[in-house]
Amino acid sequence: MDRPLKIYLGDLTYDTVAISTEATPLNVGFIASYCLDKFGDKVEITLFKYISDLENALIDSPPDILGLSNYCWSHNVSYEMFKLLSKKNPNSIKIWGGPNFPVDLPSQKQFMKKFTDIDAYVPIDGEIGFSNLVELVLKLDSLEQAKEKIMETPIDGCITRNEIGDLQFSIPTVRMKNLDEIPSPYLTGLMDKFFDGKLVPMLQTNRGCPFLCTYCTDGNSAVNMVNKFSKDRTQSEINYIAKHVHKNTHSMFISDLNFGMIPGDLETCNFIAGSQEKFNYPSKIIATTGKNRKEQIIEAIQRLNGSMVLYMSVQSLNEDVLSNIKRDNISTEKMLQLAPTIAKSGLNTMAEVILGLPGETYENHIESLRKLVATKMDDIIVHTCMLLDGSEMATPEQRNKWKFETKFRILPRDFTTLCSGKKICEIEEVIVSSKDMSFDEYVRLRMMGFTLWMSTKGVLYDSLIKFLHQNNVDVFELFRQMVERLPCAPIKIQKIFDQFKQSTIDELYDSPDEIISNIQDDAQYQNLLDGKGAINVYQYYQALVLTKYMDVWTDYLLQISKDLLVKNGIFSEEIRNEFSAISDYCRGTCFNPLGPNRMQTNPEFVFQYDVFQWLSDKNGTLLLRDYKFDSPQKILFHLSDDQFKIIGDTLEMYSDTIIGKTKVLKMISQQTLWRRPKII
């Protein structure tokens, strides 16, 4: 080529009703910085995150090469961009990359046969494969020659087609061991334009995962080796981000797959703690913690000043299910034995389970939830099992073995209208029944999952849950009876659950084609704009309850708790007084966390017991009666100025709608959200 090669790289997000995938496009930033370092002024590279920006650029000034990431949340829109470029510049080179790609050869052939507009696919660690393609193009005189050459010769790190459409590859997966060979997209300034107050910075300190979980796209032997960036680079990037981040952005993503477990993570935590002290950033870190070496992970997270949750990603506590998903190499028993140590450390814990895994039944799923509640997890999240291209579980063999029945649903907030007028969205495939679980059981377990989602939020009801545990009440019965007692529940509670159940059913479609056809109808598309579809059902109803029904939900929870105490025959006068204090503490903590008048509405209660100090006793040996005040104290529940600012900034970033609040609740910590007690 006798001119610089024009390259567009994108990691796209929808932002129709609220920004959907809010992480900065670090993945394509790595590819850009690597190519710029290798090819210098022979290439001109522009990065894109927002769909409309890329769409307009393709129309006004189409590139020579377009490279886009392929994840479940950007698959359809990325392919629409490839098709648009094919019309504008038929000779352009179009390269897709990322984990959303089948692992078995027959499915790979079907994939490449279906998506004919792409010239090459880079499945893992895109820098080398993409740069090999760029190098090939630069050696030739024209794009036409390059397209012909791609069909003639396999390219390391890429999967391509030959002239008759058969797949060709030499080394389809090329990984880089010394990650510092990739110049930092942050330190070179490539990411500066994405500090825009809408996106959240993402940090990566290593790549790879040593586990082989069949439901995960990273459960692949090709990425078992963990490769790392240097400590100096990591520290420099953290400081650079903290200096340049938008004033309304308080969070940070870490994309490492087992954060806290890998050697060097303790030092990363020290670097972040230094940034928190110097720049007051970040106040919340969103990362997936490691599956083993929990003692080290606890030590790491303790250094982060309450900004990060310790994930206990058990997925199931049934040994047969764990074996079915190749997760029996992770010590679940060891994980749960650490619960007392975690409690003493003061860390918040979040347990994750997946509904619909191979071999899972209604009964063993319930038992997993019961065990997690007994271990006093602060937060329990039940995910619906997705079948991801790139995971072993999505292969035809696994589907047939477990007799999965699947449905399709629109990913939350992932829809838009293109300049052409075409309406598109992203679609995920989820397991709703199998040979071991019926659809009705799936729906009922989703309702149980929502009860846990709403009611195990650490700070929110931790006083109630601790009180019930100390009085030998089976706390899981509280959550189970919230579902079982629905016919006798208050009308507003019945309405919430009825709507939740209907939304759980209505979000499911028989095929992707049915979804795409449906949203072309203006009335159906308006439903998406109005928040009646394309929602995360858990998050949507959490935001709805917090906005309109928090008092009703809390009263229902407290009434069932009281009934359980009475049933156990321990509701003495002393217990009654203590329970009254606990009830007022819960009502004060959860009052009006997101309302515009939240600083002016500070509830007050008179307490005989110092509930706050009792909660601070991490040993859990002293009872509430051991913290009785010498005289009754009036306590006010308030939000600090820092809490008000963080909540306000995040509402401004994502909007003060129910849909916007679903993002707000994800991006701020539990400590920031809820009110704190202050003796008047």
Image (spheres, rainbow, N blue to C red):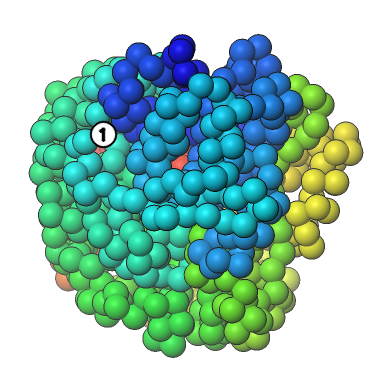
The answer to which of 574 and 638 lies nearer the viewer is 638
Q: Is residue 422 visible?
A: yes
Question: Which of the two residues, 651 or 612, is positioned nearer the viewer here?
Answer: 651
Q: Position of residue 657 (x, y in %)?
A: 62, 31
Coordinates of residue 453 in the picture (x, y in percent): 50, 58
Tally the marks.
1
Q: Nearer the viewer, residue 679 or 71?
A: 71
Mark 1 element type = loop
Where 416 sits versus 168, above or below? Answer: above
Residue 659 seen: no
Residue at position x 19%, y 37% in the image: 180
- Quarter location, residue 501: bottom right
Q: Name the residue carrying label 1.
A: 182
Image location (x, y in percent) of residue 645: 38, 23
**Crowd tier of the residue under label 1, counting other residues whose Cα lies within 10 Å: few below 14, some 14–19, many 20 or above:** many
In the picture shown, does residue 365 fall above or below 588?
below
**Amino acid residing under circle 1:** Ile
Q: Residue 326 vs residue 76: left or right?
A: left
Asked which quadrant contains residue 555, the reply is bottom right
Residue at image x 61%, y 13%?
Answer: 61
* Closest to the observer, 516 or 267: 516
Q: Residue at x 54, y 45 (%)?
A: 152
**Residue at the image position 22 percent from the left and 76 percent from the top:** 334
Q: Quadrant of the C terminus?
A: top left
From the top left corner, tell me how far across and down residue 226 is, in percent: 24, 56
